[in-house]
Image (spheres, rainbow, N blue to C red):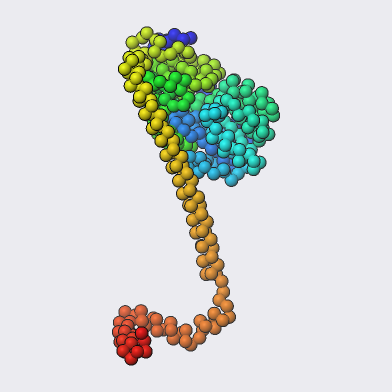
Amino acid sequence: MDSMHKHSSTEEQRSIVEIRAKLQAEVIGCEPLVNNLKKFAANDAVYLSSAGNFGDGLIGLGTLCLFEHIGISPKTQDTMIDTRIPNTNYIIVGGSGGWLDGLWGHYAEMLDVFFERGGQALILPSTVKGFETFFEKYASQITIFAREQVSYKHLAAIKGMQDRVFLCHDLAFATDFSLFTIHDLAQRSGRLNLFREDEEAKISVHYSHNYDLSLLWNSISWSDKAMCIRRLSPLVSLMSQFEEIHTDRLHMSILGTIVGCNVSMHPSGYFKNQAVFDYSLARFPNVVFTHSRPDDDPDPGSVNRIRDAQDIEDLQQFADKTTNFVERLRILTEELQATRERNLSYAYQLDERSRQLEQSAQALTEARPSAQQQAFLESRGYRLWVRYNRLYENERTGPALRKLRSAGGRILRELGILK
């Protein structure tokens, strides 16, 4: 299946729509997934939505469509803004590829604290590589869904996880695509190259005429349905105007396939793409998985890597500069994160101080005066002082009293009584 296919026919497009609907039905009808979601929602679980780029956005929208279909609406926490562990015993973790040991370990770090408190986590369909010690340690507190067979077999082989791991398609397939405008065949032409330009890329050298559109929106939580639709709509519209999509990004492959483009899917830095293709995407007639490099394709429209010696030298210099820039950016990002955490801490402290002051003020307002305070308030001297202050502040008598007070003070100073 390494050769590229021809333009899809109208009959093939109907087949694509039917397969898409069948995959969506399989996700919605996955009893272990639905039953666990309802159980966790009934226990006031907090949903930690998928966070990251456009691919995570497609997962996020599919998850929200699934929630809506089965009738649950769990509380949501935006982990990009609030990094604290939710104050609950149950959490639902959005599906992702964020379980790549040695590269993506943020979920494990966050959940480690949560599990130490005795919490239970439901992890939606994900790809997992490594983390054997983590899953063995907390097996009794984890229910996890793998989105392909490789991760499923890996997790099922970990001690204690045999009855805690299930299999279900990536939740991007649960998305209701009637929410989007998809262009028809007559409006499609050309080729769009969407190769990775991040840490998961199998080949570090970037391609010319390449657009890594997934990174246009990045480092955000996809927990609001209207926001997901608003930001994904232009991408769906753009991709469905192309006849061919060449990419090593999983969800650009899924999206391109679902909207009816002819997709040439390439491997990323590990098994994820091949595994999801084998389990889900291979059903579609308009997608192939290829291990050949794009620049090996003799077609004039193929993705060309720079071959000229001077270009390679220039590219190396650029790469060196980029490495330095990335390192500076990493340091700056860490500093900004530390500053953000300090600011959040200050904000929480100020909120607590404000709450304490309000409670103290309320207590003072409600407290009864002592017998001594009450006697003072009822004394003739205090009543005269109150009357004097009223006259002093009165707009008619006040000016005269202030002049008299000023003159009296001047006389006393002249007599040496008041300094």
Which quadrant holds residue 25? Answer: top right
On screen, residue 240 above or below 64: above
Residue 208 shows in the view: no
Residue found 34% across the figure and 80% down from its top: 394
Q: Position of residue 220 (x, y in %)?
A: 45, 36
133 with respect to 204 (left or right)? right
Residue found 56% across the figure and 25% down from its top: 127
Residue found 36% across the figure and 81% down from its top: 392
Frontmost residue, 341 versus 17: 341
Residue found 48% across the figure and 52% down from its top: 346
193 with respect to 43 (left or right)? left
Total numbered circles: 0
Say which quadrant the C terminus sits in. Answer: bottom left
Q: Position of residue 203 (x, y in %)?
A: 44, 19
Frontmost residue, 332 versus 215: 332
Residue 367 shows in the view: yes
Q: Position of residue 271 (x, y in %)?
A: 53, 20
Q: Position of residue 82 (x, y in %)?
A: 50, 43
